[in-house]
């Protein structure tokens, strides 16, 4: 009938409005009510760069760069990852503490267990997340994506070849106090190298091995305590490690010498 058409149109419009707003509808099994419907958001392709967010990489915050931005090391990886740090025990211990805070288990291979005992006892809030082992006595760690491992090798100037090597979700950080005869081999095979203050002769040699620019390797002999030049095959970055109050209380202030 002609008079009934408006009623039918009104009913259909009300149904569409209900579907748009989610009001007056029955819950859908497993999904809940239909939410509000709005126009899709879109931007031109040439404006996509404006949507970038100031979020850093996933990993361990080791300090700040020259512009004061957080510097992050992605240590926990699904592929083998070797790190060599020519520097002080303090920086290695801060790195170990912060890696433990991300959920990694830390196995320390060292000939000076007394220097690591306080850290091992304090880390993890009572959980045994940092374990100490004599040189050459690190057992298999069973690393996995859900339980990554960082092996810290604090074995002096001439660390022997480790029984436990880098593997998926198991990174190895080797600490060298100075540029030793084994250093060139370690630097060449490492995915990441950190260098703290060294002598001018050592700086020149490291510059040749790592392919550093003159200004970069000359700066190595003048670095302040707590500053590290982190190098990858394609990047170089000077980083200042700033300890938290808890780290300072446990480890003391930043220092190059132990």
Image (cartoon, rainbow, N blue to C red):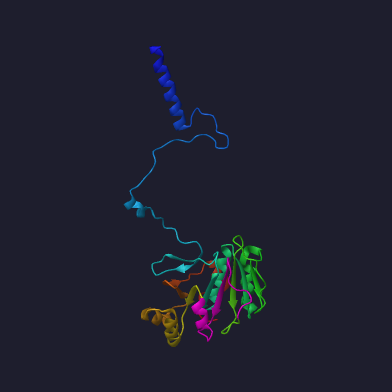
- Image coordinates of residue 222 in percent, x first then y, are 42, 81
Residue at the outermost front position: 1
- Image coordinates of residue 44 in percent, x first then y, are 33, 48
Q: Quadrant of the C terminus?
A: bottom right
* Occupied quadrant, residue 148: bottom right
Question: Which residue lies at the image location 44% right of the left edge and 32% below the top edge?
Answer: 20
In this view of the protein, can residue 170 be seen by the observer?
yes
Question: Does residue 105 show up magenta in the picture?
Answer: no
Q: Nearer the viewer, residue 38 or 123?
A: 38
Q: Quadrant of the N terminus?
A: top left
Q: Please state the total of marks drawn on the protein image.
A: 0
* Occupied quadrant, residue 144: bottom right
Question: Does residue 175 show up magenta in the picture?
Answer: yes
User: Where 196 sits versus 125, above or below?
Assistant: below
User: Where 51 sits versus 10, above or below?
Assistant: below
Task: Indicate left or right for 199 with 117 as reference.
Answer: left
Question: Which residue lies at the image location 44% right of the left edge and 24% below the top edge?
Answer: 14
Q: Which residues are magenta?
A: 161-189
In this view of the protein, can residue 87 be seen by the observer?
no
Question: Which residue lies at the image location 54% right of the left edge and 84% below the top edge?
Answer: 182
Q: Nearer the viewer, residue 223 or 201?
A: 201
* Occupied quadrant, residue 166: bottom right
- Image coordinates of residue 83 in percent, x first then y, are 52, 74
- Image coordinates of residue 101 in percent, x first then y, are 57, 63
């Amino acid at each position: 009938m002609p008079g009934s058409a408006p009623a039918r149109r009104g009913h259909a419009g009300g149904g569409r409005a209900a579907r748009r707003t989610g009001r007056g509808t029955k819950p859908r099994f497993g999904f809940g009510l239909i939410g509000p419907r709005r126009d899709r958001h879109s931007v031109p392709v040439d404006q996509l760069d404006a949507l970038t967010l100031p979020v850093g990489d996933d990993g361990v915050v080791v300090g700040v760069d020259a512009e004061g931005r957080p510097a992050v090391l992605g240590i926990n990886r699904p592929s083998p990852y070797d790190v060599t740090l020519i520097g002080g025990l303090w920086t290695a211990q801060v790195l170990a503490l912060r890696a433990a805070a991300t959920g990694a288990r830390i196995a320390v291979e060292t000939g000076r267990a007394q220097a690591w005992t306080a850290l091992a006892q304090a880390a993890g809030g009572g959980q045994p997340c940092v374990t100490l082992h004599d040189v050459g006595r690190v057992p298999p760690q069973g690393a996995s994506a859900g339980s990554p491992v960082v092996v810290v090798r604090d074995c002096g100037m001439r660390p022997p070849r480790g029984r436990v090597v880098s593997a998926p979700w198991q990174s190895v950080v080797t600490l060298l106090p100075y540029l030793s005869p084994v250093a060139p081999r370690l630097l060449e095979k490492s995915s990441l190298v950190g260098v703290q203050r060294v002598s001018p002769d050592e700086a020149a040699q490291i510059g040749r091995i790592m392919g550093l620019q003159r200004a970069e390797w000359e700066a190595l002999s003048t670095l302040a305590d707590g500053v590290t030049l982190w190098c990858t095959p394609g990047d170089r970055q000077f980083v200042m490690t700033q300890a938290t109050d808890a780290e300072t209380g446990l480890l003391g202030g930043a220092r190059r010498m132990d």
